[in-house]
Amino acid sequence: MNATVLNKAPLSLLSIDEGRFALAHDRDCARIYQLILDGQAHSRAEIGRLLGMRSTSVSRVVGDLVARRLVIETVGEPNGRGRPAAILLAHGRRIGASVIYVSSQSLSGALVDINGHLVAERRTPIEGDADNDTIAAAMADLARGLVDAMPPGMSHAGTAVSLSGLIDLKRGQWLMASRWPRMRGLDVGAVLAPVAGPVEICRNLDAELRARAAREPEPFAGGTLLLHWGWGIGLAYAVDGEPFAPAGSFGEIGHWRLAALSSRPCGCGNTGCLETGAALWSLLPALRKRWPDLDQDEIRLARQLAGLDLLSLPQIDMACELVARALANACRLLFPARIAVSGPLSANPQLWARFNTLFRAEGTMDGFAMPDLAGVSASQLYEIHGAAAPLLGRAAEALLTERS
Ligand SMILES: [Zn+2]
């Protein structure tokens, strides 16, 4: 792959690994489907040229892809002489995946096609005192609504549930979330499998990091950290875009316990966690004393905080110091080449400059380069894309090997 291709954002969420196919014909199908998906080939002749394949072989593969409705063949404009060449396009709405995710005090749902377009969206506010049954019923409703919203001809890849808080990935359970303290150990897999399975659960930060790396492979090559500094504080770590999440719970930097915050109570049941001095849930009361209209939704808050003199509050200055030190310590554990920081606080230029200075002052160990630190603008689209991508990929692989 050359540099111009790497620099270009992929057109689809799919990255098909042809090495997973045992039969040569299936591998050819995968390779040619990927070329068409990425917009690198639009005709049989182009495919033959790019892959050095004979036209009869190309035609057999394209015929299969068209029969499975993964690819649409349309007739192009006449070009003066002779018959116009057929144009090959990936069928964007051939497969859809549902994603259920947390947005502020709501559960949201999105039906995503293979190009990352949101075909349908739903949102259900959930009261702070909701228990397992209430949240399970809301999730099942969202999942059902998204399947019902599928356009004709779309195959459903399943439902991905992207969660914050503590998660048991292997058992498919949502153990704890600070926004809904009465919820404990919700069996998300059991709730959704009969409604809109297969079900896959993931950490929201892992999903976001996967999608950011897929969009920009070069800056996210090697080991990268994503620090989310918002309502809660958490970390994701990935190597070449593949998140490291061995069992589900990982990177709970927000619950690192610090002597400076000794007796402050935290939603996790402990005291003195980093979040008790630096997360928005603990900072908002002080911020609202100065600026009463501050929202609790992170996206709206990012816009509100951008223009405020946040550093004039001693609590914010202390939060910067605590997070910078925690992040520097995390670097001594994971040695990332790059750190992306998301969340509403990093959207404030003065705060960001101060944080950058503090982080640099924490230094690194002799012989190791300082990791590249960058603020990234928040967008839940990354989380949705990163959560949907594995399900969409598996569904596409299944269609590629389908025997008629
Ligand atoms: Zn805690």
Image (spheres, helix red, strand yellow):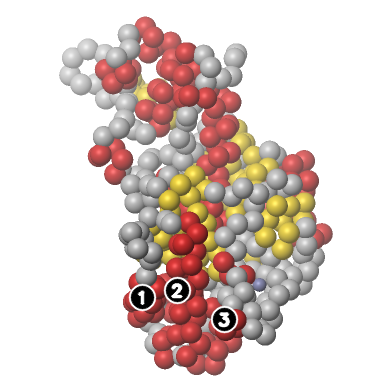
Question: For mark 2, what is the residue?
Answer: 324
The image position of residue 10, as x and y in percent, is 37, 41
Along the horizontal axis of the image, is 47 left or right of 210? Answer: left
Residue under the image location 53 percent in, 34 percent down: 393
Residue type at mark 1 is Ala
Question: Which sits in the foreground, 224 or 121?
Answer: 224
Report the mark closest to the observer, 2 or 3: 2
Q: CA distance from mark 3 to mark 1?
A: 20 Å
In this orientation, does residue 381 appear? Answer: no
Q: CA distance from mark 2 to mark 3?
A: 13 Å
The image position of residue 309, as x and y in percent, is 39, 87
Residue type at mark 2 is Ala
Question: Which sits in the foreground, 278 or 139?
Answer: 278
Residue type at mark 3 is Gly
Task: Tell me the quadrant of the picture where the C terminus can be found.
Answer: top right
The quadrant where residue 175 appears: bottom right
Q: CB under 8 Å between callouts 3 and 1? A: no
Which element is circle 2 on?
helix
User: Disc 2 or 3, which lies upstream in sequence?
Assistant: 3
Q: CA distance from mark 2 to mark 1?
A: 9 Å
In this orientation, does residue 245 appear? Answer: yes
Question: For mark 1, what is the residue?
Answer: 361
The image position of residue 220, as x and y in percent, is 38, 50
Question: For mark 3, what is the residue?
Answer: 277
Report the mark closest to the observer, 2 or 1: 1
